[in-house]
Image (tube, grey):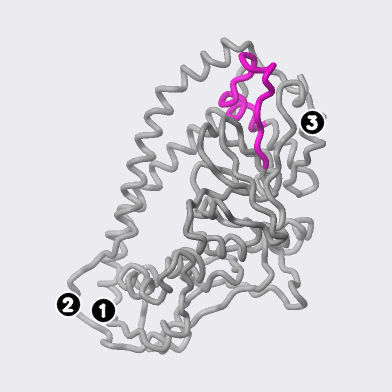
Amino acid sequence: MKFLDVFNEIDKGDYALTDEEVYASLQNGDELIPLYGGNRDHRTTERKISISAKTKKGIPITVFSGEGIIISLDGSAGSMTYKNGEKFALNHHAGFITLRKEAIGKVNLEYFSIFLQKFYREMGVSDGSKTLSLTQIYAEEFTLPDWKVQNNILRSLRAVKDKLNVLEILKKEYDSLAKKELTLDYQEYQGKAIDISTCIDYMSGNAGLTEECIYQTLQNNAEHYQVLSSATEDNTMMGEIPMCVINNRKLKVFEGKEGLLVTRNGKAGNTKYLSKGKYTINDHAYILYVREDSPFTINLQWLSLQYKQDFLSYASNSDNGTWNMTGFFSHTKIDIPAYSEQLLLVRKYQILQRRIEAIKRIEDAYAKLVAKEIA
């Protein structure tokens, strides 16, 4: 069967829905709903938008709801997530699939989202580009088992999915603990009341580094860098971008050392530790790092854990918070314990992280299982 035999035309998300419009909408003071895009998973997101938000062109956003499937059209093209009843918004890198009335009782949307995902992901990869056009989707034929078979397969998976839901709740509890400020009684110090600017420096972001810019440069075969923004969860990262020029300026990158991502907008003052890698950021975040001439040895994970409230205290008190980088570096003083004692605090945090990662591995194993084709 062809797509339009059973589904309505895909409702694409809103164009011109830039970060500026998203952050500005948070000031509206009304209901906030999730905003999804071309990510692999649309179950959770750190990105929220006002239900009354408007695009850059002044057009009210589309609010999606009801039963259907979110499908990524760029980035993680072909990735699908079943939704039923949740209100949300989409940018134009994703679309919403709904069932035609005459196909009710023939196609189970949840089954389709699970077992046809591999089919559409493979369709969306050509010449290194991960995009999926509506023309491609409408043209390709697919097969589905009988309605009863679809439902029987889903029932057989239900027990596993119920257990995964329990693990998801447990993971959120671990996440909540990990985000709290951990403390330790230190015995030895390298120094006290140290101006943070004497040992920590920062890199600001790239103006104009948007999702549109990323997708336009995907064909470039230059070395790629992971794009970081105000989202600190792995599944809400913006993807990768090759070395390029944006607004007549060479892309600023961060590589070869550890860093600390600090969000400037939205969840201002939140941090994420960055192991050595190849990164770049848009202008909604900063990357902090230890100065080469620092007289003290500092573990950046320790810094983010021990001084979590100090980072947050320089965020403006609004839904659309902005982190005051200048104030933070001008006024923050820190006590720096022995490096070995810093590591003790980090290890307490890593115990929680290992448990979170163990749950994620189980979730990934399930995802690979259901991605296999059913004979």
Q: Which residue is mark 2?
A: 187
**Lower sequence index among marks 3 and 1:** 3
Q: Amino acid at mark 3?
A: Tyr
Cα–Cα span, label 2 and label 1: 8 Å
Mark 2, Cα crowd under 10 Å, few <14 / some 14-19 / many 20+, is: few
User: On residue 88, which mark appears?
Assistant: none
x%, y% of residue 218?
Answer: 75, 56
Which residue is drawn at the image coordinates 82% and 29% (left, top)? 139
Q: Magenta span covers which residues?
A: 95-118
Frontmost residue, 115 versus 86: 86
Q: Amino acid at mark 2?
A: Gln
Label 1 sits on a secondary structure element that is strand
Which residue is drawn at the image coordinates 43% and 28% (left, top)? 161
Frontmost residue, 23 versus 290: 23
Q: Which residue is mark 3?
A: 138
User: On residue 337, which mark appears?
Assistant: 1
**Lower sequence index among marks 2 and 1:** 2
Q: Amino acid at mark 1?
A: Pro
x%, y% of residue 244?
Answer: 74, 69
Mark 1, Cα crowd under 10 Å, few <14 / some 14-19 / many 20+, is: many
Label 2 sits on a secondary structure element that is loop
For residue 125: magenta? no
Cα–Cα span, label 2 and label 3: 66 Å
**Lower sequence index among marks 2 and 3:** 3
Mark 3, Cα crowd under 10 Å, few <14 / some 14-19 / many 20+, is: some
Q: Are marks 2 and 1 in contact (CB under 8 Å)?
A: yes
